[in-house]
């Protein structure tokens, strides 16, 4: 009976340890692409460093830019903005939602004087060796249409930007 209890306890301990390991993210990347969209040349550029251990954020920096022939948009989010994370483990896929804990305070620290939505979320979806970065941050970055989903191969560092319709 004791050996069965020990085996059950060991199994639970091992499974919880594997789950914690699966919820680790330690990456940095730098990506860019130039292409035509609606007859206009656009350039996307992103770089980031993300170290997450479950819901604990050890380091987070994401910078994104979209340049058009006549104007551009850029955005950056980092630890100084007051971040919080949620994590969901779905087996091979791990989803993090990194958000501003207080969007209005983050805007005030940057000196923004105009009102904008208080929403800001960067969704990170790791599926095997691929990390999808899905930004939506009108609080600091303006319109969602200024940015696109980015996929990064965590082994090779190669990047792919979602094509706009």
Image (cartoon, rainbow, N blue to C red):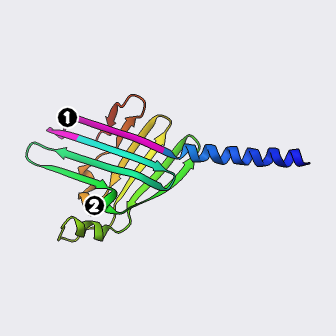
The residue under the point 23% across, 70% down is: 108
Q: Is residue 35 above or below residue 96?
A: above
Q: Give the Cα separation between the discs numbered 1 and 2.
A: 24 Å
- What residue did someone put label 1 on? 34
Name the residue: 37% across, 36% down.
152
Q: Quadrant of residue 43?
A: top left
In the rendered structure, the answer to whether residue 68 lies left or right of residue 155 reads left
Question: Given the current orientation, which residue lies at the most extreme left position?
Answer: 70
SS assignment for the magenta stretch, majority: strand
Instruction: Return the residue nearer the eye: 141 or 47.
Output: 47
Give left or right: position of 108 versus 39.
right
Q: Secondary structure at mark 2?
A: helix
Q: Residue at x 37, y 48 (%)?
A: 134
Q: Quadrant of the C terminus?
A: top left
Asked which quadrant contains residue 68, the reply is top left
Which residues make up the magenta segment? 25-44
Query: Reading the chain from its start, which is encountered first: label 1 or label 2?
Result: 1
Looking at this view, name the residue that lies furthest to the right: 1
Q: Decide whether residue 123 is among the magenta residues.
A: no
Residue 96 point in image, percent of width and height: 46, 52
**Residue 165 visible in rendering:** no
Instruction: Count the marks.
Output: 2
Residue 14 image offset from top left, x and y in percent: 69, 43
The percent position of residue 147, horizontal first and vertical second, equals: 27, 48
What kind of element bears circle 1?
Answer: strand
Q: Pointer 2: what residue?
A: 138
The residue shown at (28%, 36%) is 31
Q: Position of residue 88 (x, y in %)?
A: 53, 52
Neighbour tally class for label 1: few under 14, some 14-19, many 20 plus, Cα within 10 Å: few
Identify the disc placed on residue 7: none
Categorize mark 2 by other alpha carbons within 10 Å: few (<14), some (14-19), many (20+): some
């Amino acid at each position: 009976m004791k050996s069965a209890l020990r085996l059950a306890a060991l199994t639970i301990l091992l499974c919880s340890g594997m789950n914690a390991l699966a919820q680790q993210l330690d990456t940095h990347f730098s990506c860019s692409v130039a292409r035509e969209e609606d007859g206009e040349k656009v350039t996307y550029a992103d770089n980031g460093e993300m170290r997450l251990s479950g819901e604990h954020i050890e380091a987070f920096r994401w910078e994104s830019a979209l340049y058009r022939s006549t104007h551009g948009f850029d955005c950056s989010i980092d630890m100084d903005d007051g971040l919080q994370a949620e994590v969901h483990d779905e087996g091979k896929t791990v989803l993090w939602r990194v958000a501003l804990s207080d969007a209005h305070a983050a805007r005030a620290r940057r000196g923004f004087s105009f009102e904008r939505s208080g929403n800001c979320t960067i969704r990170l979806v790791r599926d095997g060796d691929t990390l999808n970065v899905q930004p939506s941050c009108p609080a600091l970055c303006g319109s969602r249409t200024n940015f696109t989903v980015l996929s990064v191969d965590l082994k090779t560092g190669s990047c792919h930007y979602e094509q706009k319709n």
